[in-house]
Structures are given as structure tokens and as C-alpha cells.
């Protein structure tokens, strides 16, 4: 296990983030948030090592993954936390960031072993040691459940305030893989489904176009309808038509 003592401070460092002891922070760079403080933020926050084992998780992230205690959660491999296909995609994303040694914003579609599924907008950073070598992944995830209408703004503003993002994401719309409509974020896949939906395509036609099942198409469009507050598919199309 990598040292994740709660007094360690999280800081921007190079192209990623690092954990540093308070007594090793230079006077020129006094910013940093302790892991104990990070455990309380209203975002899913976690650290993985290079082999995708959990090294730290706040309670919010632990509960979302279906576990009661972060202590039991520690050391688990991602394959033990979510369904195999989702785990493989998450591992791929983590390796991509480790290899590139660069921060990325990613849409992740996660399926838990109990079949609960949700989209999450995930901000992932390479986890660096004091020699600027990648030792894992530090992530922040903003999940969007079926009936979640929450805006991205509070979550992203918090990361900006903490100094973990150089500029508000709202000022960099091209950085987001998906689309924001009426202050509601839709993942890249949801956006692709909606794009074809407003053009009159059926679920079967959209599924064939995107390489997914018609049932999955209906799930995405249903989630979008609920989150934007539409009462019917026709109302959903009316609400989003101007965006496409």
C-alpha cells in the first residue's frame, strides 16, 4: 500500500497531482488540502495504484460502489467493484492517463455487480511522486443517476477553488466529452443517442448506428428524459432540438 496518511496534502504538481507531507511544502507554495479534508468533499474521490487497486476512497465514493466501509474498500481491485466490461474500460482509461502522464476528462459508464448502472463525468489525474514519476491515478467522479438533475457547476467550481483545475471547465466547453443542456450534463453516448433521436431514428436504428442494443438506447433516452424533466419522448425532443 502507498502511504495515504490523512495529514498528507494534495497538490497540483507538473501534469498531475501529488501527496506531500506538510513539513515539505515550500513557502512559495503553501496551498494544499489534506486527505482528511478531501474525504469530506461532496464529490466521489479516490486513488488507485498502477495495478488499479484502491489506495484511498472517500465515504461518498465507497457508498456509491455499494460498500459500507472505506476500510473494507481499500486494496480492492476495480474488477471486484464493478461489472467486468465496466472494469476493463476503467482500467483502459487509467492506463491511457498513466501513459500520457496528463489530466483528462472522461465519460465513464459503470455497471455494478447488482446491475445498477450510471454515467459519471470523471476527472482523472496522474498520481505523481516527488520524482515526478507516475505511481497511480487520482480521480474525481460526478455521477449522474437516472433522476439526477444536478448542475455540474458546483462540483467543477469546487475543484477550481481548490486549485486543482487551472480554469473553470465552463470556460472550456470543448474539454467536455458530452453536452450541457439546461444546466444538465449528458454523456458522450447519451448525446449521440439524442442526436439521432431528434432526427426521427428509432431505437433499433440508433442501436445499429452506434453498435449498441435497442434496449440500451431506450435506457439512455429514458435517463435523459427523466433528468431534463420531460414527461414524454416528444417533449424531450422539443426541449433538446435546438442543441442539435
Image (cartoon, grey):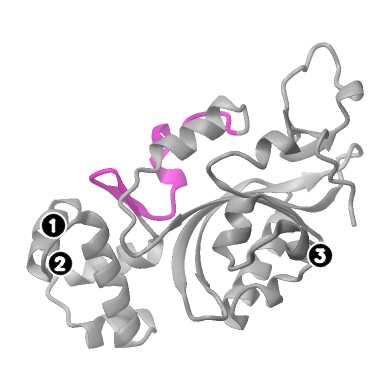
Name the front one of labels 1 and 3.
3
Q: Is residue 169 something one can see in this rendering?
A: no
Judged left or right of residue 72, residue 220 is: left
Question: Which residue appears at 29% of the width and 67% of the height?
Answer: 223
Q: Is residue 167 something one can see in this rendering?
A: yes
Quarter-of-image position of residue 75: bottom right
Residue nearest the viewer, comparing 152 with 65: 65
Quarter-of-image position of residue 147: bottom left
Q: Local crowd at mark 1 within 10 Å, few (<14), some, or many (≥20)? A: some
Residue nearest the viewer, comparing 229 with 102: 229
Q: Which residues are magenta?
A: 165-185
Spatial CA span between label 2 and label 1: 6 Å
As drawn, the label of residue 75 is 3
Q: Which residue is mark 2?
A: 198
Q: Local crowd at mark 2 within 10 Å, few (<14), some, or many (≥20)? A: some
Q: Is residue 5 above or below residue 62?
A: above
Q: Earlier in the sequence, mark 1 or mark 3?
A: 3
Q: Local crowd at mark 3 within 10 Å, few (<14), some, or many (≥20)? A: some
Q: Which residue is mark 1?
A: 241
Judged left or right of residue 206, residue 69 is: right
- Quarter of the image containing the N terminus? bottom right
Amino acid at each position: 500500500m502507498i502511504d495515504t496518511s490523512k495529514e498528507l496534502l494534495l497538490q497540483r504538481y507538473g501534469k498531475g497531482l501529488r501527496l506531500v507531507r506538510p513539513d515539505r511544502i515550500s513557502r512559495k507554495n503553501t496551498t494544499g488540502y489534506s486527505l482528511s479534508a478531501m474525504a469530506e468533499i461532496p464529490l466521489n474521490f479516490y486513488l488507485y495504484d498502477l495495478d488499479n487497486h484502491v489506495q484511498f476512497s472517500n465515504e461518498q465514493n465507497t457508498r456509491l460502489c455499494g460498500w459500507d466501509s472505506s476500510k473494507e474498500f481499500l486494496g480492492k481491485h476495480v474488477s471486484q467493484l464493478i461489472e467486468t466490461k465496466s472494469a476493463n474500460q476503467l482500467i483502459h482509461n487509467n492506463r491511457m492517463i498513466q501513459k500520457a502522464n496528463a489530466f483528462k476528462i472522461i465519460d465513464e459508464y459503470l455497471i455494478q455487480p447488482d446491475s445498477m448502472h450510471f454515467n459519471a463525468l470523471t476527472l482523472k489525474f496522474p498520481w505523481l511522486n516527488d520524482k515526478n514519476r507516475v505511481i497511480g491515478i487520482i480521480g474525481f467522479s460526478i455521477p449522474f443517476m437516472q433522476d439526477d438533475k444536478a448542475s455540474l457547476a458546483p462540483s467543477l467550481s469546487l475543484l477550481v477553488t481548490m486549485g486543482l483545475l487551472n480554469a473553470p471547465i465552463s470556460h472550456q466547453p470543448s474539454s467536455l466529452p458530452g453536452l450541457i443542456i439546461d444546466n444538465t450534463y449528458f454523456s458522450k453516448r447519451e448525446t449521440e443517442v439524442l442526436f439521432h433521436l431528434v432526427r426521427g431514428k428509432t431505437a433499433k436504428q440508433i442501436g445499429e448506428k452506434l453498435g449498441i442494443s435497442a434496449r440500451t438506447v431506450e435506457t439512455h433516452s429514458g435517463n435523459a428524459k427523466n433528468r431534463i424533466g420531460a414527461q414524454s419522448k416528444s417533449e424531450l425532443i422539443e426541449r433538446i432540438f435546438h442543441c442539435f
